[in-house]
Amino acid sequence: MSVEKKEREDEKAIVAGGEPEGDVEEALPLPRAEEVPAVVEALLFATTAPLTLKRLQALTGGVGLAELEDALTILRERYAGMGSGLMLVEVAGGYQLATRAEVADWVLALHRHRRKNPLSPAVMETLAIVAYKQPIVRAEIEAIRGVDCGGVLRSLQDSGLVEVVGQKEVPGRPSLYGTTVQFLKTFGLRNLKELPSLTDLQTILTVPMKGSEQDAAEPGDETPETESPEPNADAEPAQE
């Protein structure tokens, strides 16, 4: 299986609320117990995507899940206790290093070229329909909203929040839309099971999003004005 195909399958598993499978890299040396926190920290620093426990297990040559959880606890407490500008967050089915909200102004100053794209009410409404009804075709979204959604769906796809996940087995085989791992990262969710209730969603949709810029670790992308934890000390995490 190619690396690209494996990554796509892992992302689908995460979005669906599951756990991607991890094949242990048997050629890798097994780190000593005292080395595990440092190895995990290095892996989290080097990645631009959340790493699941199973993926960490594969990348560390088969370190036990309990040992990995202990290492993550050590890192979380270390960053919390040293007054660091970094923090360990659990998001999109895995773990990442992210910058704290308190240092957001300086991080954003590093990426002045980035443009904020606030999510409009129409976009938020369409995104909510996709999130709660997925997989869903465009005609079904338009039936719920009562207006054409072609432009909004393209905008959500350009933002990386929504993608085509298949075709519905009906005449014409229309595209089915679903949310992405980027959607989970943007809204600070570990998986779709953490979506708020519909009652809470009504409140969320009426409150302006807290301003930040997403994916600061990857300059050049234009993303919605939402809060999202990002790796490599170059992004602003979601506030609690």
Image (tube, grey):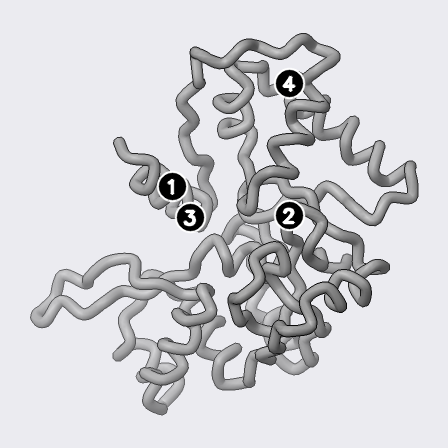
**Residue tagged 3:** 16
Given residues 126 and 11, the one toward you in this image is 11
Name the residue beneath numbered marker 1. 7
Which quadrant would the C terminus be assigned to in this image? bottom right
Question: Is 135 situated left or right of 56 in this image?
Answer: left
| Mark 1 or mark 2, whichever is nearer to me | 2
Give the mark nearest the N terminus, 4 or 1: 1
Give the image location of residue 75, x and y in percent: 77, 31
Q: Nearer the viewer, residue 35 or 166?
A: 35
What residue is drawn where x is 54% and y is 10%? 29
Question: What amino acid is at disc 1?
Answer: Glu
Q: What residue is shown with label 4?
A: 66
The 10 Å Cα crowd at callout 3, few under 14, some 14 to 19, many 20 or more, is some
Q: Secondary structure at mark 2?
A: loop
Quadrant assignment, res 227: bottom right
Judging by the rendered image, the residue that carries numbered circle 2 is 231
Residue 14: where, in percent of width, then height? 46, 44
- Element class at badge 4: helix
> Three-letter amino acid code at disc 4?
Ala
Residue 180, relative to residue 152: is it above or below? above
